[in-house]
Amino acid sequence: MVSVILPAYNEEKMIQKAADTISEILRGAGISFEIVFVNDGSKDRTWAEIERVSRENENVNGIGFSRNFGKESAILAGLASAKGDCCVIMDCDLQHPPETIIDMVRLWKEGFEVVEGVKASRGKEGIFHKFAARTFYKIISSATGIDMQRASDFKLLDRKAVDVLLDMPEKQVFFRALSSWIGFESTTVEFDVRERTEGTSKWSTRSLIKYAVTNITSFSAAPLQFATGVGFLFLLFTLFFIVQTLYKYLSGKALEGFTTVIILLLIIGSICMISLGIIGYYVAKIYEEVKGRPRYIVSKSTYEKEEK
């Protein structure tokens, strides 16, 4: 059986359509399946729609968080609840084409344990948002050492890969990178990002920047290395000015450049504060991890209908 996991945040208009579209495609292909919606603390009627659809469609189930915990937590909660031999993670807005699931399942049956959906095109986006997205993926690819230029959360994972991900104790996870980091026999399937038919995108440039900072620091120590690199760069500048100062002193010339000294002090002070800020952010991440709080809290579930 294939479990299709759909994180949902304020997607009341897409629940019915997503369930109907995926069910029709997988039934037509003769694939045994379940659909698991994960309500990530939505503020609209998303949970009410999940409950209604689950009563009408025996292949649909859902779980609901007590509050918004984020997409990464919603994906992990879906994986923990899924009963399938493999799991497909996709967006609830159907920008990930459901027809691609058939190709993923075919490759899985051929022996691949991770099937990555990679973007052939990004669809229609604003110029600034597209620039921000490309910049983000370049930075995060460089920081993590994994090519993520066309990566997405749309992928199929064999049960073995799912179990490995769920066994990882870390709280701050970057699912898109971790699914590649775990290894296993993997392949890719290209897809074109479709236009959203209902609702609005939850991703703004601001949220993309926040997403980038959170995931880079949770998966890589590159920012700390950057601070160290800048420190060595300014060490070279310091050595240069030491030599210049000694030369002027020994040659009997008056020492000039008070403005330069002030500018250098301001720059060095700024670099020190930025470096301390980066270190402090990592300390905060360590603090979050050692507290041992759960990644998410499930307050509602439609799986209860199977127990009655």
Image (tube, rainbow, N blue to C red):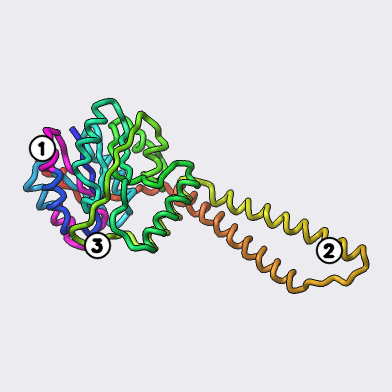
Residue 168: quadrant of the picture: top left
Residue 27: which disc?
A: 1
Quadrant, the C terminus: top left
Label 2 crowd (10 A; few <14 / some 14-19 / many >=20): some
Residue 200: which disc?
A: 3
Would residue 1 be visible to someone looking at this image? yes
- Tell whether 200 sits left or right of 51: right
Q: Where is residue 86 shown, x and y percent of the image?
A: 25, 33
Residue 175: quadrant of the picture: top left
Q: Please, what secondary structure does the residue beneath circle 1 have?
A: helix
For the point 33% across and 33% down, the residue is 187
CA distance for labels 1 and 3: 29 Å
The residue tagged 2 is: 245
Amino acid type shown at disc 3: Thr
CA distance for labels 3 and 2: 60 Å
- Tell whether 222 sits left or right of 113: right
Which segment did they paint magenta? Answer: 23-50
Q: Where is residue 212 shown, x and y percent of the image?
A: 43, 54
Q: Is residue 36 magenta?
A: yes
Q: Is residue 59 magenta?
A: no
Amino acid type shown at disc 2: Thr
Q: Please, what secondary structure does the residue beneath circle 3 have?
A: loop
Amino acid type shown at disc 1: Arg
Contact flag, marks 3 and 2 (Cβ < 8 Å): no
> Residue 126 versus residue 306: which sits nearer the camera?
126
For the point 90% across and 69% down, the residue is 253
Q: Where is residue 271 shown, x and y percent of the image?
A: 62, 61
